[in-house]
């Protein structure tokens, strides 16, 4: 029945298919692992990933089963159970996963995509059946597109996994369809060879990548972008509102995440950020207002009088008729007019803080400006075109950020300067003595020259990203007791403030985490009131703000933050300048048009490197660090991993060696365990020892890649083995196969003649047909590999 | 009621043959040796012919002239000790020439029925595809129901009526391909093929000095009709496990779902396949059917039923056998499997493997 000539079961194509299926499952598991964050409780985390690992292993084991063209559909029960197992845990953990991924992704879209991922894994497990196979293939097609949509999630290393996942998904998709093409499409299988299928899959992946890039760029929270909110599509934005029931009783989008659609209100929302509703109005004009019914009166027309005769009845003079009128659309207000009235225009990655003046002396009520230029800062030429640089640079940390500032109507000698400038140029001016650095970070014209209107500054900054900022250290200037350094007059009140601050910062260690805790507490404690002012009688604005008003403009937030930070021993100061946020962003030009109402105050603290870091205390204003390129992030992650390994290298090397040896010798280990288990349990076990013995031999043959062909029975297989190795215990092996067959398909279900020493025969077979023998057989008998029927 | 008790009752309900099982197998072995002398070097073909005979089916032999088709049929008839009728099918052959006809007897003034060659134990229809479809259809009732109806009168045929038909695949001029209804009456279709060189040498040597040029079994190696009846009864009692019936139905369903095959195997074909596999197991001395029996009888049983399509059917059958998961003897034990049968089926349902791959899980 079976010939020994062909080699089908372990052809490269079949191995490739198996490897692809395995890698798909592996990629999904790694993908899930990469989303683990600190926010998820570790214990639940381990349970969840253990479940996933088990599900992946089961899927892997099941996916090894050969697909058949004659297979039937799975039962509803099995499909339901599998889908529940695969989808339900993901949906339950969607919120935690969304928090882990980042603020741009809504929980429902995480749940949606992750549930489909689970369904695809389930499809992989059940892919022996045609309908499920097609379903899994369709799921994979969707995930290929979704992977590109999520290409900008905040974990840069995920992009690599996303790309791998997309490629694997495409390959699997094509392999799945291609392998089933004879039945699905009634196309001869030879027309779609494996390599052609994979080529088509790769081409589809590339096509999906290009389509996803062009369709969804910028791909930020693509699915969430379909849900309108007045604060953009950032779910974590506290000022964001959903599109429904805007106005006084509005909800935040994270409170009503299912809210979608345009607002029913015709009014702009009172959020400081433009919503998509605003963007729509900006580009398309106001929506057509409701049609109002009215009456019109036909006037006597001069032409009608000249023409003579009676006018038509419908146009008879003084005739009243019902008609409709439309109000003229309101003039285009907002962003298009902002540009003409701007003080300056900024281009760069926002939102950003543009420093204009700094204040470092505080008397309890007012801040005083720093005394002139910084002695250690000077302007020098770089030698490249007209670029100039600072003579005192910080440590080579951070990410290069380019910012362009165009002065429109600023009657001052100071230029709005972005944080951490390194180099700059101003048109064709190549004289360094025209410029000076004021107050550690503000560029100014010397000799009290005003900035000429239309002057353009190009800054090249090296700003800290999140990772570098989180590792910054701050020298302690000594804790002032009570916290605030100006506390001399009201000891009782100061003690209360001290307790208040201590409650905010808790046990946070000194550094960025302590600062973040302080700012978070301050934001919770007070609210923003842009119109509030400090009464003239108040001598201590911090006490007034914290204890009495608990609301105020950004100045009070920044002042209080700087004052409290100084009390905690940080070197702090107050800075003012422009805040280039979403409100000032012009979609048409891609620039920020800054007005006088964009003036803003914030606090700054100086780290040990001498860099003044911005501390944004005002609610509604955010400090966005530049995003590191994924390559650099990947490199940093790799370096961190190497450093971690280097600290405990003996342990890691030992583990690695053990894992490598276990991987290389995995078949021997598995065979040894199975054989030992057979020896230990052959007498007491309820299962048939003959069948288990035959199974061990069958597994050894499979490990040595001399396994049975598809559709070949055990007996035929062992007969062929016996013909190839007549000197071995071929007769005993055939006997065992016959016994096993009889025990399985016979009437009496008794495997053998009771007089035969069953145990001895099995032990002889296991001792003779070892894994090494099968391997030598595989090497010596190149044509052994079965695979085709021949009659 | 357990499976064992059911089978015991089944065995007790069947009529007990006076011939012992050992004697029966010995007689079948002698018949096999006789046929092997008739058809040298074709042991597999002889086994399949015997399987067809023991499963109460009919045989279609398709091969080139001179390969021993007629000799094989004659050998079967001789070895059975029954009456052999031979019909050389031609386009002018009429149905009455096979079934018989009524003749008006002038003396008795009545119609007398003249029996045709179909009233025999073994009917050899040589080159059956040269007969017209009308004549071919005369055999439908005889093959399926073992009776013929002429002028509203049913005439039963011999109890062991066995049709051996031959056809020549190479000469298609002036032939009438057998309709599917006719093909479905045959249990299997065989091709004999050329013998190996050494057997052909043996054949040449045996022909020297023999005037008639034919070989036949001796009288003492004949199988009586009673023995044949006992053997056919024993074949019907060969046990077929439910897993194997499931496997067989998977294969049948695969032929029906294959787009390249016009018509799949009919339920009658499935029955014939199972009975042939039973006969094959009986010839191997087993009282149960194994997956090998199903696979070995697949090509002769299926090729006669799937022959109407234009594709080369033998590779397609091999592909079906390869793609359909086969029940694995190494995957389960009998006693523990019976004990775990219920839980294993539940798990296999949960794992979704109850249809295509359940053979590895269900005990």
Image (cartoon, coloured by chain):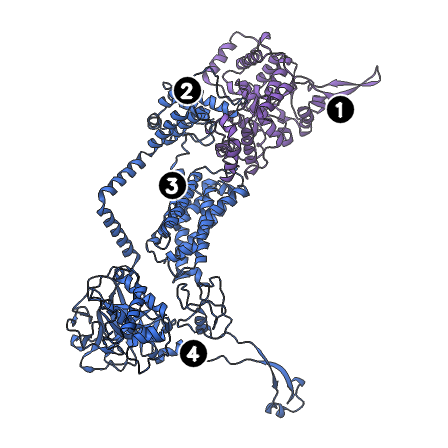
Chain colours: A blue, B purple
Q: Is residue A790 visible?
A: yes
Q: CA distance from mark 2 to mark 3?
A: 38 Å
Q: Which mark is residue A19?
A: 3
Q: CA distance from mark 3 to mark 1?
A: 68 Å
Residue A201 to residue A283: above or below: above
- Residues at discs 3 and 1 in contact (Cβ within 8 Å): no
Q: Mark 1: which secondary structure?
A: strand
| Residue A219 image position (x, y, % from top left) | 39, 61
* Mark 2 nearby-residue class (10 Å; few <14, some 14–19, many ≥20): some
Side of A297 where A125 appears, left or right? left
Chain ID at mark 4: A
- Residues at discs 1 and 4 in contact (Cβ within 8 Å): no
Q: CA distance from mark 4 to mark 2?
A: 94 Å
Query: Viewer-nearest of labels 2 and 1?
Result: 2
Q: Mark 3: which secondary structure?
A: helix
Chain ID at mark 2: A
* Mark 4 nearby-residue class (10 Å; few <14, some 14–19, many ≥20): few
Question: Disc 3 or 4, which lies upstream in sequence?
Answer: 3
Residue, disc 1: B150
Question: In terms of image quadrants, where is residue A290?
Answer: bottom right
Q: Mark 2: which secondary structure?
A: helix
Side of A282 where A38 appears, left or right? left
| Residue A721 image position (x, y, % from top left) | 40, 23
Residue, disc 2: A759
Q: Nearer the viewer, residue B338 or B228?
A: B338
Query: Viewer-nearest of labels 3 and 4?
Result: 4
- Residues at discs 2 and 3 in contact (Cβ within 8 Å): no
In this view, which residue lies farthest toward the left? A375
Residue, disc 4: A333
Q: Mark 4 vs mark 2: tell me if same chain.
A: yes
Q: Nearer the viewer, residue A438 or A51?
A: A51
Question: Disc 2 or 3, which lies upstream in sequence?
Answer: 3
């Amino acid at each position: 029945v079976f010939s020994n000539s062909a080699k089908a079961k372990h052809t490269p194509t079949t191995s490739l298919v198996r490897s692809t299926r395995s890698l798909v499952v592996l990629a999904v598991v790694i993908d899930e692992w990469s989303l683990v964050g600190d926010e998820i409780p570790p214990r639940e985390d381990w349970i969840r990933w253990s479940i996933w690992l088990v599900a992946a292993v089961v899927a892997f084991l099941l996916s090894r089963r050969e697909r058949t063209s004659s297979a039937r559909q799975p039962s509803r029960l099995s499909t339901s159970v599998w889908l529940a197992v695969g989808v339900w845990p993901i949906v339950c953990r969607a919120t935690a996963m969304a928090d882990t991924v980042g603020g741009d992704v809504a929980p429902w879209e995480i749940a949606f995509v992750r549930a489909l991922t689970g369904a695809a894994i389930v499809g992989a497990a059940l892919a022996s059946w045609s309908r499920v196979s097609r379903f899994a293939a369709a799921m994979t097609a969707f995930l290929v597109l979704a992977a590109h949509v999520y290409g900008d999630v905040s974990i840069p290393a995920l992009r690599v996994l996303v790309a791998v996942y997309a490629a694997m998904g495409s390959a699997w998709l094509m392999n799945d369809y291609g392998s089933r093409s004879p039945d699905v499409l009634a196309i001869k299988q030879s027309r779609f060879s494996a390599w052609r299928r994979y080529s088509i899959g790769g081409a589809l992946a590339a096509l999906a990548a290009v389509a996803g890039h062009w369709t969804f760029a910028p791909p930020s929270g693509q699915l969430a972008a379909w849900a309108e909110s007045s604060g953009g599509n950032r779910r974590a934005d506290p000022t964001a509102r959903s599109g429904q029931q805007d106005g006084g009783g509005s909800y935040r989008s994270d409170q009503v995440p299912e809210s979608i659609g345009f607002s029913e209100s015709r009014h702009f929302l009172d959020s400081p950020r433009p919503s998509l509703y605003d963007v729509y109005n900006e580009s398309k004009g106001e929506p057509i207002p409701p049609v109002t019914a009215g009456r019109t009166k036909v006037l006597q027309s001069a032409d009608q009088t000249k023409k003579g005769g009676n006018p038509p009845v419908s146009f008879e003079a003084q005739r009243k008729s019902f008609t409709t009128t439309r109000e003229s659309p309101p003039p285009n207000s907002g962003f298009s007019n902002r540009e003409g009235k701007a003080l300056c225009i900024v281009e760069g990655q926002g939102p950003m803080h543009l420093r204009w003046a700094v204040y470092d002396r505080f008397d309890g009520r007012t801040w005083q400006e720093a005394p002139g230029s910084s002695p250690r800062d000077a302007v020098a030429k770089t030698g490249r075109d007209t670029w100039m640089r600072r003579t005192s640079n910080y440590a080579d940390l951070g990410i290069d950020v380019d910012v362009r500032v165009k002065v429109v109507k600023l009657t001052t000698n100071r230029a709005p300067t972005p944080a951490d400038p390194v180099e700059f140029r101003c048109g064709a001016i190549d004289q360094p003595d025209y410029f000076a650095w004021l107050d550690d970070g503000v560029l100014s014209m010397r000799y009290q020259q005003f900035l000429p209107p239309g002057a353009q500054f190009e800054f090249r900054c090296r700003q800290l990203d999140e990772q570098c900022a989180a590792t910054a250290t701050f020298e302690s200037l000594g804790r002032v007791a009570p916290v605030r350094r100006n506390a001399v007059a009201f000891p009782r009140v100061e003690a209360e403030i001290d307790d208040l601050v201590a409650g905010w910062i808790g046990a946070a260690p000194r550094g960025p985490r302590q600062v973040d805790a302080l700012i978070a507490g301050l934001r919770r404690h007070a609210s923003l009131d842009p119109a509030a002012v400090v009464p003239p009688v108040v001598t201590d604005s911090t006490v007034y703000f914290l204890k009495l008003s608990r609301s105020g403009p950004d100045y009070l937030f920044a002042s209080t933050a700087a004052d409290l930070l100084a009390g905690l021993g940080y070197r702090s100061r107050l800075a003012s300048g422009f805040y280039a946020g979403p409100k000032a962003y012009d979609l048409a030009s891609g620039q920020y048009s800054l007005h006088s109402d964009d003036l803003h105050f914030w606090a700054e603290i100086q780290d040990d490197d001498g860099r003044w870091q911005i501390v944004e205390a005002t609610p509604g204003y955010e400090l966005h660090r530049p995003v590191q390129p994924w390559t650099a992030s990947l490199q940093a992650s790799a370096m961190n991993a190497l450093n971690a390994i280097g600290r405990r290298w003996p342990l890691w090397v030992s583990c690695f060696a053990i894992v490598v040896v276990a991987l290389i010798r995995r078949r021997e280990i598995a065979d040894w365990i199975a054989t030992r288990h057979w020896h230990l349990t052959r007498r007491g076990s309820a299962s048939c020892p003959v069948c288990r013995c035959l199974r061990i031999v069958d597994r050894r043959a499979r490990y040595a890649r001399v396994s049975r062909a598809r559709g070949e029975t055990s007996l035929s297989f062992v007969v062929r083995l016996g013909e190839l190795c007549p000197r071995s215990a071929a007769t005993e092996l055939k006997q065992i196969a016959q016994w096993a067959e009889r025990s399985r398909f016979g009437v009496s279900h008794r495997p053998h003649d009771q007089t035969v020493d069953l145990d001895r025969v099995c032990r002889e077979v296991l001792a003779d047909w070892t894994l090494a023998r099968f391997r030598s057989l595989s090497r010596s008998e190149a044509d052994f590999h079965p695979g085709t029927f021949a009659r | 009621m357990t499976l064992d008790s059911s089978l015991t009752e089944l065995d007790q309900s069947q009529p007990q043959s006076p011939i012992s099982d050992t004697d029966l197998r010995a007689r079948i072995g002698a018949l096999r040796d006789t046929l092997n002398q008739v058809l040298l070097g074709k042991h597999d073909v002889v086994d399949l012919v015997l399987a067809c005979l023991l499963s109460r089916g009919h045989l279609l032999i398709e091969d080139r002239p001179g390969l021993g088709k007629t000799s094989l049929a004659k050998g079967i008839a001789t070895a059975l000790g029954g009456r052999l009728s031979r019909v050389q099918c031609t386009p002018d052959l009429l149905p009455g020439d096979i079934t018989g006809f009524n003749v008006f007897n002038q003396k008795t003034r009545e119609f007398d029925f003249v029996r045709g060659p179909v009233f025999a134990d073994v009917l050899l229809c040589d080159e059956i595809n040269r007969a017209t479809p009308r004549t071919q259809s005369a055999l439908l009732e005889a093959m399926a129901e073992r009776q013929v109806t002429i002028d509203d009168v049913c005439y039963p045929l011999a109890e062991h009526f066995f049709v051996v038909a031959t056809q020549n695949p190479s000469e298609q001029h002036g032939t009438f391909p057998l309709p599917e209804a006719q093909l479905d009456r045959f249990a299997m279709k065989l091709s004999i093929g050329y013998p190996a060189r050494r057997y052909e040498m043996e054949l040449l040597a045996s022909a020297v000095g023999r005037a008639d040029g034919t070989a036949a079994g001796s009288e003492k190696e004949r199988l009586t009709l009673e023995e044949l009846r006992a053997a056919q009864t024993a074949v019907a009692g060969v046990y077929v496990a439910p897993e194997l019936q499931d496997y067989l139905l998977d294969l049948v369903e695969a032929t029906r779902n294959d787009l390249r095959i016009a018509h799949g195997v009919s339920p009658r074909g499935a029955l014939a396949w199972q009975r042939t596999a039973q006969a094959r197991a009986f010839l191997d001395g087993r009282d149960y059917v194994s997956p090998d029996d199903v696979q070995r009888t697949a090509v002769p049983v299926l090729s006669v039923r799937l022959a109407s399509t234009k594709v080369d059917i033998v590779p397609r059958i091999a592909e079906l056998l390869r793609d359909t998961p086969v029940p694995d003897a190494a995957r389960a034990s009998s006693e523990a499997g019976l004990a775990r049968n219920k839980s294993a089926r539940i798990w296999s349902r949960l794992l979704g493997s109850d249809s295509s791959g359940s053979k590895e899980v269900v005990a």
